[in-house]
Image (cartoon, rainbow, N blue to C red):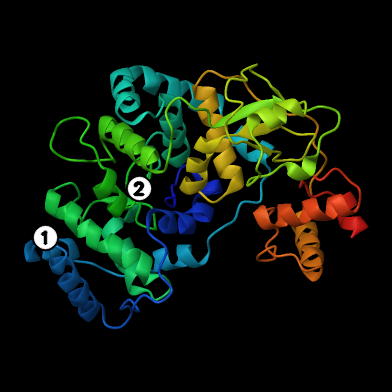
């Protein structure tokens, strides 16, 4: 997301289904409101015949289409996973401490050393540091350990045939045909995430075609097996998301006694220099990026970890729509880049799922757009909380507390 990510490692299961639906949408363009309706449903053979015609019109050979679709089946487990996507209900401290483990840091540093030449080429060609790539590699599949066990062809056939989001998945199925024609994928044996992502950083077929790099020189792009292919392809993809070489993405800071917290949160209009002038101090002492646009994010309020984000943080928001995932991934990249563990602080106790839903209900009743009443402290809920905190004369840090719930 960008894409969705689905993996089956023990850690990945915590958030795999939560990200999967978002991932597919991320690597695919959003459907146009007045676009023609995409064919879906009905007899599977008839449906595949229609896809075959579209694939041939897009340049595929009849032979490659037939090879791709031979033995294709609808997978009810894919539909079940799609209908039952989980959600993030962990705090930043809970999730980041679980994902950014010492074991993963050790393995990642070993990978960075093992493939030092490839990472150097990735940074030279695309401007993306090794730590950024390695963090996604770790979070998506535990360095390839958990890439998913769904047959990719059947997953994409199922989601294209299903009438829930065919405009997203039918183009991915046609792209899969192209990968088969190139010899990069075996439709009978290639497995991956339930939503069709392939490889160690979980990319959809269209993205592999658009950004795939043959890093090992074998004439193919194989993200499941080849680390050089994976590293360079991921770097090219991240660059396409807008990453700027030589600039930071996330910087840990300490906060002064008082601060206009209502100015914090993604989407602010201040620069890093503005925050420095207000007393926000970079923990690493680096103030050289003062002229860059910057937002102060407080994942667990003013008493917890605090970070300034920079324009490069946007690539994380493109990769995943989950604030907790993106902040954790950016922090993970910091650790691989040599920065220390964040200061945990002493954040106030958050709300339970039931309490969060009650808070969202109260905010919605006051006219705020908090999205679904789902118990998730998402962006809409955070903005509403800040506005109510400001109205009540409390520090407007966007963190949901029992005190705020009681006040409302």
Residue 238, quarter of picture: top left
- The residue identified by callout 1 is 64
SS class of the residue under badge 2? loop
Residue 381, quarter of picture: bottom right
Residue at 37% x, 65% y is 168
Mark 2 burial class by Cα count in 10 Å: few <14, some 14-19, many 20+: many
Residue 75 seen in this snapshot: no
Asked whether the residues under the numbered discs 2 and 1 touch, taking CB atoms below 8 Å apart as contact, a structural biologist would say no
Mark 2 → mark 1, Cα distance in angstroms:
21 Å
Residue 381 seen in this snapshot: yes
Residue 307, quarter of picture: top right
Extreme-bottom residue of the structure: 42
Mark 1 burial class by Cα count in 10 Å: few <14, some 14-19, many 20+: many
Q: Position of residue 316 (x, y in %)?
A: 50, 42
Residue at 31% x, 24% y is 124
Q: Which mark is first along the chain, 1 or 2?
A: 1
Please give left or right for residue 218 compared with residue 115 in the image. Answer: left
Per the rendering, the mark at residue 131 is: none
Per the rendering, the mark at residue 203 is: 2
SS class of the residue under badge 1? helix
Residue at 40% x, 33% y is 143
**Residue 266 or 98: which is nearer the viewer?**
266
Residue at 11% x, 60% y is 64
Q: Position of residue 335 (x, y in %)?
A: 54, 24
Q: Position of residue 358 (x, y in %)?
A: 80, 63
């Amino acid at each position: 997301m960008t894409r969705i990510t689905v993996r089956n490692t023990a850690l990945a299961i915590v958030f795999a289904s939560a990200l999967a639906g978002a991932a597919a949408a991320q690597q695919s363009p959003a459907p146009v409101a007045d676009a023609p309706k995409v064919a879906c449903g009905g007899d599977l053979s008839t449906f595949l015949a229609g896809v075959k015609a579209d694939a041939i019109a897009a340049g595929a050979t009849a032979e490659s289409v037939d090879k791709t679709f031979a033995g294709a089946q609808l997978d009810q487990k894919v539909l079940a996973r799609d209908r039952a996507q989980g959600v993030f209900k962990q705090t930043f401290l809970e999730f980041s401490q679980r994902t950014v483990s010492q074991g993963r840091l050790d393995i990642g540093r070993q990978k960075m050393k093992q493939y030092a030449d490839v990472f150097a080429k990735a940074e030279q060609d695309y401007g993306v540091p090794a730590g950024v790539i390695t963090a996604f590699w770790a979070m998506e599949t535990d360095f390839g350990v958990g890439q998913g066990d769904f047959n990719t062809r059947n997953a994409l056939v199922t989601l294209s045939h299903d009438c829930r989001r065919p405009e997203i998945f039918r183009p991915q199925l046609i792209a899969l045909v192209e990968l088969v024609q190139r010899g990069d994928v075996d439709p009978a044996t290639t497995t991956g995430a339930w939503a069709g992502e392939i490889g160690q950083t979980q990319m959809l077929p269209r993205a592999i075609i658009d950004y795939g790099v043959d890093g090992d020189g074998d004439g193919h792009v194989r993200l499941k097996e080849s680390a050089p292919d994976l590293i360079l392809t991921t770097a090219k993809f991240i660059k396409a998301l807008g990453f700027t070489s030589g600039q930071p993405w996330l910087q840990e800071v300490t906060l002064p006694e008082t601060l206009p917290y209502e100015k914090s949160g993604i989407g602010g209009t201040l620069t890093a220099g503005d925050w420095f002038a207000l007393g926000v101090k970079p923990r690493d002492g680096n103030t050289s990026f003062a002229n860059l646009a910057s937002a102060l994010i407080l994942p667990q309020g003013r008493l917890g970890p605090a970070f300034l984000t920079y324009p490069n943080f946007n690539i994380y928001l493109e990769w995943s729509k989950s604030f907790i995932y993106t902040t954790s991934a950016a922090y993970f990249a910091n650790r691989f880049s040599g920065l220390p563990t964040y200061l945990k602080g002493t954040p106030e106790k958050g709300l339970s799922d039931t309490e969060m839903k009650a808070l969202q209900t109260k905010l919605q009743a006051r006219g705020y757009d908090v999205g679904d009443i789902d118990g998730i402290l998402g962006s809409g809920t955070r903005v509403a909380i800040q506005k109510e905190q400001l109205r009540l004369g409390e520090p407007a840090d966007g963190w949901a507390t029992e005190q705020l719930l009681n006040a409302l």
